[in-house]
Amino acid sequence: TGLRPRSPCARAGRMALARVAPVALAAGRAAALSTSSPVARRPIAVAACRVDPSANLVALVSRSCSPAVNFRHAAVATDAAPTAPPAADTLTYVDTHCHLDLIFQKMTSEAKKGKKGDAAVVDFDSWRNQLTQLEDPDSESYLGAQLEACLTVACSRRAMDAVRDILPKPGVFAAFGCHPLSAHEWNADMASIVESAVADKNGVVVAVGECGLDYHYALKEIEADESLADDAAREARWEEVRKTQEDVFVAQMKIATRLGAPLVIHTREAEADTLHLMREHLRKDARVHVHCFTSSASMARTLLGEYPNLCLGFTGVCTFKNGGDVRDVVLDTPLDRILLETDGPYMAPAPHRGAVAHPGHVPHIAKKIAEVKGVRAEEVFAQCRANTRRTYGF
């Protein structure tokens, strides 16, 4: 038997190109200096890097500027407005949402099938070196752009511990937060870890999240829990889970607001409640990344209309044969409000369905978005790179 129709879950079930120098962060500097945000006012020391405009992270991987360089700024909607797309050999991209710890874990598991010893271990360096070779413009595997950076998301205590060894790597940034399905982990200690990491002016943890509401999996777990004897017990458990998710979401919105930091939002089958909480607790000018967007077109229009600095992230789902609804949202979403992401290791795009998704798959997503919108892939790469800088400050 299911939950009573009045349950929030039942309601949820019915809601069906400027030339970009890879680390040039001048756009938004004036806004950063004028803001009162302690995070946004940190200096952006990029001039000393002397980066060639045609360079990219692949070329810079062994000569990063300085661990003390801070890449965050308070951005506004007019930052880094693109003009003509850059030449193909200068195009770069960012995976704005992935889970590097899980990617390498899954890659290692796959590599060890039929192998023995440490030779099968996949880590950041081995993966990055292989991707650099694949993205050589002279290679047949080159897809028109090269990976510049990625944002790895740690949204549980385990994940925060797991990514610390990856964060010093060139081009790796992070978001720290608590996923709605990990909301039971949230306490004062975890809140302190998240806020301290994002507030660290010398760190690379640049955003709060992912956080939000996920009624899909929460309800599945409740329905499968045999210890809940009847509808009353399931309803009581649902109300407890829902309130916990809401409280933890609100707490993280408050942290992001205090710090003036970007917020990464996860929402699944919880559109009405997500919007309600955002309206109650989030500034209209907040920088927001609603990641792996698979919600309704109506939800997309509302979010984009009410939050001018909000972007929607699209993953490999937009390349799936059954991804027509997502492609419809892509078509209706202005290109300057789109972020490219894989959510790796999940949902690898076509033609890599079933593989471990990783940042190197972003070009497939960019090309599908270009196809849907009837524009050149170069325009998608350039504009989405500018959108990333505007949202995350790197």
Image (spheres, rainbow, N blue to C red):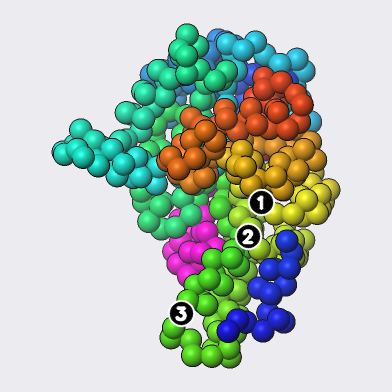
Q: Is residue 249 above or below residue 219?
A: above
Q: Residue at x 36, y 51 (%)?
A: 161
Label 2: how many Cα within 10 Å (few below 14, some 14–19, many 20+): some
- Circle number at residue 268: 2
- State the quadrant of the C terminus: top right
Q: Quadrant of residue 39?
A: top right
- The residue lying furthest to the left in this view is 117
Say the numbered circle drawn on residue 294.
Answer: 1
Q: Which residues are magenta?
A: 177-199
Label 3: element kind = loop
Residue 199's spot in the image, x, y percent? 53, 47
Front tag of 3 and 2:
3
Check if mark 1's residue and mark 2's residue have beta carbons within 8 Å.
Answer: yes
Q: Is residue 184 magenta?
A: yes
Locate the N terminus by quadrant. bottom right
Looking at marks 3 and 2 on the same chain, the residue that comes earlier in the sequence is marked by: 3
